[in-house]
Image (cartoon, rainbow, N blue to C red):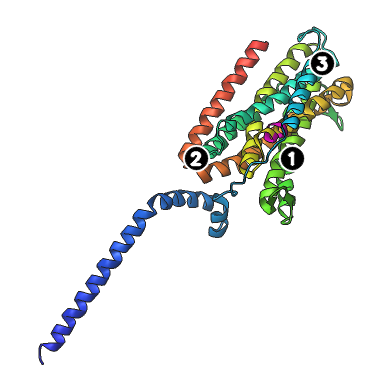
Amino acid sequence: AEMRPARAEEMRQTRAATQRRQSGEACDAAKSDRSTDDDHTHWRYRVSRSLSLDRAEFEKAWKGPAKLEPQADHWLLVLLTYATLAAVSWFTMPPTMSAKVPTVTHVWYYGWLSALSTGLGTLPLFLWSVPSSSWMGACNAIAAGMMLSASMSLVSEGCRLEPDGAELWGHQLPHVGRVAAGVISGMVFVFVSKKYLEEYEDLTIGDLKGLEAAKMLLIVGVMTLHSFAEGLGIGVSFCGANGSTLGVFISASLAVHNVPEGLAVALVLIPRGVSKFRTFVWAIFTSLPQPVIAAPVFLFVEHFIMWEPVGLGFAAGAMFWVACFELIADAVKEIPVAGAGLCMALSFSFMMVLSNLIGETVN
């Protein structure tokens, strides 16, 4: 009888130790099964906190849109579209690509070539039928680096324009001030557009609804509207004593900058079920305002010349916002921050070197 309390206490301690050991083994097994997911969730959640997202918003955001089946395109529509693009490229080509005195045909055609280059940005995603999440993240980071480089180049070009004597209330308007005003206007425009579209939760585009449809419309809409500003830059650049040289340089620079814009459009459309052909057409469509606006601006340049720095700054600001708050945010949802930073740095450096080479070749 005297040993019963001691025996009972020993048995109780033994059962407790067994339960703790079993609980620890189960916990280790669960951690082992989801170690990779926990690692990714860990750094992704840290990024989400830096973006001021709560846990529920984070879990919804990083998983991205559900993979949708791509749309089918009729072969006759595809053939007709390609034939139209080829016909416009052939029949609007000027007799000579270079001229000491540019004509409206030169302005239109260089703007048209710049618009077509946007379609090149969609080609990387044509190599895979269903791009993996890691590949999508890397592409987002690459496009972000290229667009940041393009923004910097546009700001630099706007600040280096020749003085045009523009005045406001008796004071000269420097190019730097007008470019800065354009950058701020472009960023505010994208921010306000995003907030406006997010209010329409019942927005529907094809099979997409709510925020997914709003994101798709935002990217395509921003790329299209900021092309008006780039078309203004092309039209004005062909005027003046050095118009034949400056116009070619601006057009070539914008053509290079349009490539990451096309990639940005593809990164939004293809994962959401839009076919590769339609993505290619939509990418070109977003840059069509460039030749459409460039021609009349060239004809009536005296009414638009003071707005060229503002237009270049507006395009730079819009691209800067999309790169930082859309593409980079999407990239870090799929790949580690270090990998996204490396992709951005390499693409940024490549675009800067390419822009410098274009400037040296033209000059």
Q: Is residue 351 visible?
A: yes
Residue bearing the label numbered 3: 91
Frontmost of labels 3 and 1 is 3
Left or right of 340, for residue 17: left
- Location of residue 120 (image quadrant): top right
Tell me where residue 246 appears, x and y as whole percent: 74, 15
From the image, tell me which residue sits under label 1. Answer: 221
- Amino acid type for the residue under numbered disc 2: Ser
Which of marks 2 and 1 precedes in the sequence? 2
In this rendering, position of residue 27 left or right of residue 357: left
Q: Between tags 1 and 2, which lies in front?
A: 2
Q: Helix or strand or loop: what does disc 1 sit on?
A: helix
Magenta stretch bounds = 278-282
Mark in the foreground, 2 or 3: 3
10 Å neighbourhood of mark 3: few (<14), some, or many (≥20)? few
Give the main secondary structure of the magenta stretch.
helix
Would you call the spot at circle 1 few (<14 residues within 10 Å), some (14-19), or many (20 or more)?
some
Q: Earlier in the sequence, mark 3 or mark 1?
A: 3
Q: Earlier in the sequence, mark 2 or mark 3?
A: 3
Q: Is residue 170 left or right of residue 117?
A: right
User: Residue 304: percent from the left, percent from the top?
Assistant: 85, 26
The residue to which callout 2 is attached is 134
Check contact, mark 3 vs mark 1: CB within 8 A. Answer: no
